[in-house]
Amino acid sequence: LNESLQKHVIPALQLQSNKSILNILDICYGLGYNTLATIYYVKRENLDVKLNIVSPEFDEDLVKSLKDFDYPKEFDNLQHIIQAISTNLVYEDEHLKIQVIIDDARAIIRSIDVKFNIVYQDAFSPRVNPMLWSYEYFKNISAIISDDAIITTYSTAAPTRMALYENGFKLHSYQGKNTRKSLIVSKQPIDTLEPIDMELKIQRNPDAKSIKDSDIIHKYAQ
């Protein structure tokens, strides 16, 4: 819960505090911590904002099983939401809409027509799931976010930074309470955050490169 709040929810919502409606892309749903932590934080802080959360997830059985998952007590008053998502993959009320879409995240991103204000980039690591960390993946992400969107991610790996940088994103170092450093990414510089000098990083590590889809295809073809 602390990881979700400190690396994703709190910085993203604070940076987008001027908006009354937020479209959030949660990559991928998994145990639902980022989505649920977002709702928990909005309720805890009594924020006047409507949330539209879309989350791809490949494992439908996992989502269906979450109605019996032992979540922390902070989510006790969200049980009706957890039950609805586990049963129907959807929850909606006056202030909140959640859609868990069972499909390949790349396919969903290419077909979606929403402009997102926030992306929680919380897929399995680049080593485990490179298709959700490649140059082409972040190019697709760039096409479906607003000009002032915020991307949060725990990954500070060189291939992640390079894939984002090559797509024109600005990278910022961030460290939440009781967590390791993470990244906050945007199309525009964020004055209140520490910028990462990618040109200097490249000079110091000229062999660093982004993951390309063609590299992944070649690897799995061998």
Image (cartoon, rainbow, N blue to C red):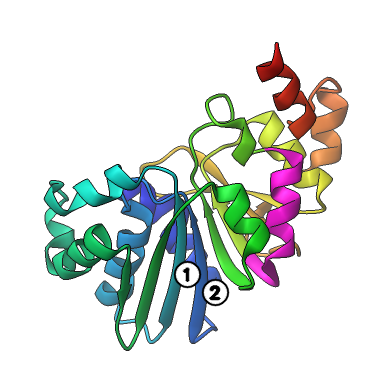
Structural distance between the alpha carbons of marks 2 and 1: 5 Å
For residue 51, above or below residue 186: below
Residue 221, position as x, y percentages in the image: 70, 17
The residue sitting at 72% across, 25% down in the picture is 217
Q: Which residue corresponds to the image point at 62% horizontal and 66% vertical from the top-left?
A: 112
Q: Is residue 101 left or right of residue 196?
A: left
Q: Position of residue 58 (x, y in %)?
A: 44, 44
Query: What span is colored magenta in the figure?
Result: 134-149
Please indicate, yes or no, whether residue 70 appears anywhere in the rendered image. yes
Q: Nearer the viewer, residue 94 or 2?
A: 94
Q: Amino acid at mark 2?
A: Gln
The C terminus appears in which quarter of the rendering? top right
Give the residue displayed 28% in from the left and 43% down from the top.
61
Give how far across and how far down residue 72 sits, in percent. 15, 51
Q: Write the residue at 62% across / 57% down.
A: 109
Quarter assignment of residue 196: top right
Q: Secondary structure at mark 2?
A: loop
Looking at the rendered structure, the kind of residue marked 1 is Leu
Give the side of residue 213 with respect to residue 20, left or right. Answer: right
Magenta residue check for 28 = no
Query: Which label sits on residue 13?
Result: 1
Q: How would you rate the neighbour count of disc 2 (Cα within 10 Å): few for under 14, some for 14-19, many for 20 or more?
A: some
Tag 1 secondary structure? helix
Q: Are marks 2 and 1 in contact (CB under 8 Å)?
A: yes
Q: Which mark is residue 16?
A: 2
Q: Residues within 10 Å of mark 1 (few under 14, many from 20)?
A: many
